[in-house]
Amino acid sequence: MAIVLGKPGVDGLSKAVGVLREWQYDGAPMQLHPGDLGWFWRSGAEATAAAVRTWSRDGQILAVGLLDGPGLLRLTIAPDAQRGEELARQLLEDVTEPERGVLPKGKVNIEAPMGALVQDLLFEDGWSADEPWTPLLRDLAEPVKDPGVRIEAVGPEQAHVFAAVHRAAFDGSRFTDERWHAMAAGLPFADARCLVAYDDQGNAVAAVTVWSAGPGRPGLLEPMGVHREHRRHGYGEAITVAAAAALQELGSSSAIGCTPSSNVGAVATYKSAGFQQRPEVRDQYRDA
């Protein structure tokens, strides 16, 4: 059977989320997580469906891609198919020919699991390695310490608090209460938690969303940020520890995060919260 490129539509998102859950395992290369789709869902179900691509054979999904911006495809592949030549060559054709409806002309980036054959083919086709990112992982087999600050779970009534911290933590953020509600209505949020940390004066100082992929699988922190007016007080470490504890409660085997290697402060925050630095990963890009 031929490998078919498809758009799942809103009704097909549950199947894409399901296979992404199944493909997460301890020791896997840093890859697209159901939580990445969950965070994208802040733009709504229709927008999420429009941004997802699947590659299937005989109804079985072999690869899932998320167009996380106009020129970035975040791609992952079933563990037993990552070195498959037929799939890799199909992926190469589909991502390099704009008429296939995956990536446009001009400068574009692809994130794919390290070691996947499609990476080799992209390099052979003239693609280059982009700036490094640092994955970080915390094993959750042992108890997680108390974060040392007040942590509250965010529900619909506190959406405005999370949104305000996010805007204050990320330059250019346009996150709103409405986007929180859209995210919370998404399929992956059933296995997610939003947390906010408070200082001694009751100010909301940091926030995180954690996404479980199911018991015994790695869970994702995305996003995690500290209010720009409350940095360098340990709140990044505190909210990251609280995130690990929340994932442990959800049954996750480990907690994972990823940040640009140039963001040395974020790398240090994760490490202070008990995360171990893993080998760097890089997107691949094609110049215009």
Image (spheres, rainbow, N blue to C red):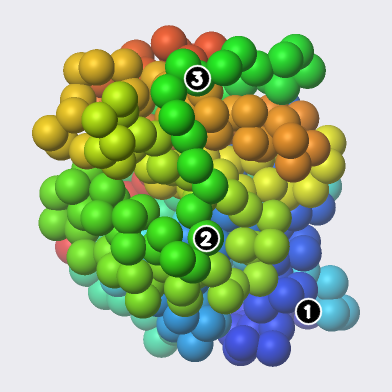
Up-down relation of residue 117 to residue 182 (above or below): above
Q: Is there any visible trace of residue 80 in the rendered image?
A: yes
- Of mark 1 and mark 3, the one earlier in the sequence is 1
With 71 as the anchor, is 64 left or right in this view? right
Which labelled disc corresponds to residue 269? none
Amino acid, disc 2: Gly
Amino acid, disc 3: Pro
Q: Which residue is mark 2?
A: 155
Q: Which residue is mark 3?
A: 147
Query: Disc 3 to disc 2, how far (Cα)?
Result: 20 Å
- Of mark 1 and mark 2, the one earlier in the sequence is 1
Q: How many marks?
A: 3
Q: Which residue is mark 1?
A: 2
Q: Position of residue 167 (x, y in %)?
A: 21, 54
Up-down relation of residue 119 to residue 55 (above or below): above
With 258 as the anchor, is 104 left or right in this view? left
How many neighbours does mark 1 have within 10 angstroms: few (below 14), some (14-19), or many (20 or more)?
few
Mark 1 and mark 3 residues within 8 Å of each other at the beta carbon: no
Q: Quadrant of residue 101?
A: bottom left
